[in-house]
Image: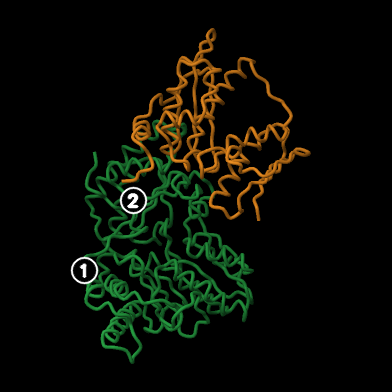
Amino acid sequence: MPFPYNDIVLEHFRNPHNVGSIANPDGKATEGSPACGDMVSVYLKVDQETKKITDIKFESYGCASNIATGSIITELAKGKTLDEAKEITWKEASDALGGLPPIKAHCSVLAVEGLKSAIQNYEEKQGLSTNNETTTEEVVRKKLKRVMNPMKGLDMVATNLIKEIEVKDGIIRVVVDLPENHQFAANIKEESKERLENLWDINKVIIEFEK
Amino acid sequence: MKQEKIYLDNASTTRLDERVFAAMKPYYFDNYAVATSEFGYSQGLEARETLSEARTSIAASLGAEPEEFIFTSGNTESSNLALKGVAKNLGVKKGKHMIVSKIEDFPVLQTAKELEKEGFEVDYLDVDEDGLIVMNQLEALLRDDTILVSIQHGNQEIGTIQDVAAIGALCKEKNVLFHTDATYTFTRIPLDVNKINVDLITVSAHTIHGPKGIGGLYVKKGTPILKIMDGGFQEFNLRAGIENIPGAVGFAKAVDLVTPEENKRLSEIRDKIIALIFKKIPLVILNGHPDKRLPQNANITFHYVEGESITLHLDMYGIAVSTGSACFSRSLEASHVMMAIGGDHERAHGSVRFTFGRYNTMEEIDFVVDTLARIIEDLRRISPLGKKGGE
């Protein structure tokens, strides 16, 4: 029977590892996708000396891919240093799960985002990071690397979905190389807006499609 | 782990009834001729007679004349024909404005969107929290150039039944054609064209244990409509193509087999699952109208958990259901029906649709709810939102 999930994914979905929360976490973040409604929280305990992740837990209000990725990403991050953990990509998580359906990439990428944000939260608390860089076309491009193209299971940048980016007077305009009545147009629009709207110097985000 | 299969997705489609299959079989193997003209050979004449009998019988179930019932390939084609066929005719003669509800099934909704691209103007009518259209809004939207109102009889997801009698009366008063998609109500909820004003009705066989690939459109005598697919002159010159005689025979048989007792039994199964879920699982809401509801539909949102996760867990126990969650859909968009009644993703995200048919039993419902209660508890344990609800 053709089934979208393999046995590793199903096992992590059925019996997810590292589920729950941590009291007084050193780092914590919740990532949500208003476009699909999924949500992930990640909690960290970090060794101050070695900067290694000593404990990690997650919670999920999401679908099977989201839960399975939360499980695998926490396994991958445990024991790693923060710098190593930051480098874990969705692709690695997906590979460790034996592959995920491309259409589900956007649900599972949230767990990876959750981990990155929890690390960022730790670093901000420790005064290790400040972020007030000016938003440029490059910054926008970098942010859009976190928006998945559901047709491919790769991000928008890697799959050449971005036709044009303009940043001017606090307004970002992105032209997406898809017809506006495309099956995934609404999804991509919402996910892109979500990634760009909270940039500190941006007031408005316009996502356009081909007529 | 896998038990006997429990199929609770009868709104998507149903299992064919053996008696329907038996009625159809001779028209594949014994007499497979086309319905010829009245001057044709005897096998063709017999086929013609068979088709006419099936038509007469289905039309009669709506209180209609045989000439008012057109066979199609299913509800998608029927609704396409209703909207595009009227648009093709009245678009030139009367106007280019239509009104449809926001919670229509895709055949009506997507056809309306296509017509917009061709220069028609479409208003999408709101519904209230129970899924009922807002009558005042409909009245206010009707114009001199409105050519068609298309509002479904019963909803595919939340099961809400619209007051088609009131909508039909208003349309008649304003001299506007009224189409209703009755795919989910046909034979389940009475609909008599002599009692209510309706010009076009979409119906289908596959939702009532009939064969897939056949449906029909009731077209009231004198309705200004044109064919949308070119070819032969079949179906009173409204639907070209060789007639699906085995399908028509199966459709007629399927209509015959639905009884008021069966509909009552389905409503009892529905009431049981709703009552049991409310009793055994906290933090749930019923989607759709509490009383004005299809006998075969229950739709429930489980707070703080996601629908695809629920359906996948249920599938491991052999239970088939559907959800309005975006994660489940082909377009990654949350159900437009759930968005229309709730206005937020939360309601759609944890919604599960249970739809019943002839082969479901009361015993199955006990097993389903017990299984469901465990699954929801497990998923809430891992949800970041579960605790907020006072669990």
The secondary element bearing badge 1 is classed as helix
Occupied quadrant, residue A117: top right
- Location of mark 2 (residue): B274
Q: What quarter of the picture does the N terminus of chain B occupy?
A: top left
Chain B: its colour in the image is: green
The secondary element bearing badge 2 is classed as helix
Please tell me which of labels 2 and 1 falls first in the chain.
1
Note whether B333 is above or below A118 in the view shown: below
- The chain letter corresponding to orange is A
Mark 1 is on which residue type?
Arg
Q: In the orientation shown, which residue stands out farthest toward the top?
A: A49
Q: Position of residue B230 (x, y in %)?
A: 49, 77
Looking at the image, which residue is at 63% across and 34% down?
Answer: A143
- Label 1 CA crowd tier, 10 Å (few <14, some 14–19, many 20+): some
Q: CA distance from mark 2 to mark 1?
A: 31 Å
Q: Is residue A197 left or right of residue B194?
A: right
Q: Is residue B207 left or right of residue B180?
A: left
Mark 2 is on which residue type?
Ile
Residue B354 vs residue A117, the one in the foreground? A117
Residue B296 vs residue A31, the one in the foreground? A31
Q: Is residue B88 left or right of residue A63?
A: right
Q: Look at discs 2 and 1 and give the one toward the viewer.
A: 1
- Location of mark 1 (residue): B19
Identify the subunit bearing mark 1: B
Q: Position of residue A206 (x, y in %)?
A: 69, 45
Q: Position of residue A106 (x, y in %)?
A: 51, 39
Note whether B160 is above or below B54 in the view shown: above
- Label 2 CA crowd tier, 10 Å (few <14, some 14–19, many 20+): many
